């Protein structure tokens, strides 16, 4: 089993910054890709950013240049540094870990950006 525990969400004004963290535990390996997705009310869950075990990253178009994903393999933790936040970034942010044929999700952390 895999457990993902997110932290770092909250309320911030537009233009501000937040850093999300996700600590993974259980049957995981540093090669497992991890990432962040988000879901706003009434919308589908969308990609924010992913990172492979080797550090290769991929970002959703709406966050490129503003968000940075990183990971500390020794601590099985992935981070999401969010800068220049906009009201449209308001959503529940979910941590994701992939194993062959399996997707694991955290419970989510709320990020609210006020205008």
Image: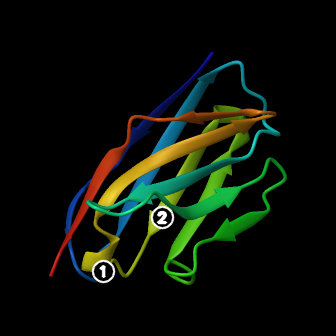
What residue lies at 80% left-to-right and 47% top-to-bottom?
53
Residue labelled with disc 1: 86
Q: Position of residue 36 (x, y in %)?
A: 53, 54
In the rendered view, would you say 4 is above or below 14?
above
Q: Position of residue 33 (x, y in %)?
A: 74, 46
- Whether residue 108 sits left or right of residue 37 in the image: it is left
Considering only vertical position in the picture, is 50 above or below 6?
A: below
In front here: 79 or 39? 39
Q: Are marks 2 and 1 in contact (CB under 8 Å)?
A: no
Locate residue 45 relative to residue 88 in the image: left or right. Answer: right
Q: Quadrant of the C terminus?
A: bottom left
| Viewer-closest of 26 and 108 | 108
Q: Residue at x 50, y 77 (%)?
A: 63
Question: Mark 2 sits on what residue?
Answer: 81
Q: Earlier in the sequence, mark 2 or mark 1?
A: 2
Q: Name the spot of residue 12 as percent of width and height, x first.
A: 21, 67
Query: Residue placed at 84% from the left, 53% from the top?
Result: 54
Tag in front: 2 or 1: 1
Residue occupying image coordinates x 31% and y 62%: 40
Task: Quote the CA–CA distance across marks 2 and 1.
Answer: 14 Å
Residue 29 falls in which quadrant of the image? top right
Residue farthest toward the left in the current orientation of the protein: 115
Q: Secondary structure at mark 2?
A: strand
**In-image side of 6 versus 103 (left or right):** left
Q: Residues within 10 Å of mark 2 (few under 14, many from 20)?
A: some
Left or right: where does residue 112 sit relative to residue 3?
Answer: left
Give how far across and how far down residue 55 sits, in percent.
78, 57
The secondary structure type at the circle numbered 1 is: loop
């Amino acid at each position: 089993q895999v457990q993902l525990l997110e932290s770092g969400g909250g309320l911030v004004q537009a233009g501000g910054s937040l850093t999300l963290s996700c600590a993974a535990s259980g049957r995981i390996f540093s090669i497992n890709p991890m990432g962040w997705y988000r879901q706003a009310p009434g919308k589908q869950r969308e990609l924010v950013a992913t990172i492979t075990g080797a550090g290769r990253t991929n970002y959703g178009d709406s966050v490129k240049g503003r968000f940075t994903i990183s990971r500390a393999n020794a601590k099985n933790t992935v981070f999401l540094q969010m800068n220049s936040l906009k009201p449209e970034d308001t959503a529940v942010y979910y941590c994701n870990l992939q194993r062959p044929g399996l997707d694991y999700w955290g419970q989510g952390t709320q990020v609210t950006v006020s205008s």
